[in-house]
Image: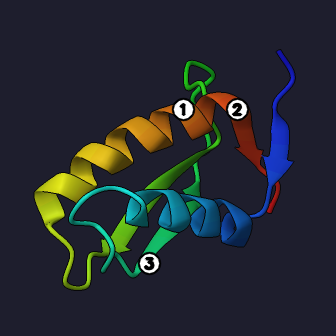
């Protein structure tokens, strides 16, 4: 399956919007996305490398992030 491509800024904005929709995550501020290189066994060319949770519940946001990132990595590749 060919994945759609998105810039790191667009991926971050999509993730932030979706995380904030989860209970106790409205205060989630930002996430940084980095390109992955090297291994032919990885299924995605990007991963989150840092997040600013603001005043959101870190545990709740981590659960939301785990599911969101997994789904988004299956659908999108990093273009920049």
Badge 2 crowding class, 10 Å Cα cut-off, few under 14, some 14 to 19, many 20 or more, is: some
Cα–Cα gap, marks 3 and 1: 19 Å
Residue at 65%, 41% (x, y): give it: 45
Q: Residue 75 carries which label?
A: 2
Disc 1 marks which residue? 71
Q: Which mark is residue 48?
A: none
Contact between labelled residues 1 and 2, with CB atoms less than 8 Å apart: yes
Q: Which badge, 3 or 1, comes first in the chain's sequence? A: 3
Residue at 36%, 69% (x, y): give it: 50
Residue placed most toward the observer, 70 or 17: 17
State whether residue 1 is above or below residue 42.
Answer: above
Residue 55 figure quarter: bottom left
Cα–Cα gap, marks 2 and 1: 7 Å
Residue 27 image offset from top left, x and y in percent? 30, 80
Contact between labelled residues 2 and 3, with CB atoms less than 8 Å apart: no
Residue 64 image offset from top left, x and y in percent? 32, 47
């Amino acid at each position: 399956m060919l994945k759609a491509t998105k810039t790191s800024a667009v991926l971050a904005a999509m993730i932030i919007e979706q995380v904030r929709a989860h209970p106790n995550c409205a205060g989630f501020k930002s996430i940084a996305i980095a390109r992955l290189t090297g291994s032919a066994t990885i299924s995605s060319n990007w991963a989150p490398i840092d997040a600013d949770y603001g005043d959101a519940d870190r545990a709740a946001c981590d659960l939301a992030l785990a599911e969101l990132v997994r789904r988004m990595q299956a659908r999108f590749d990093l273009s920049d």
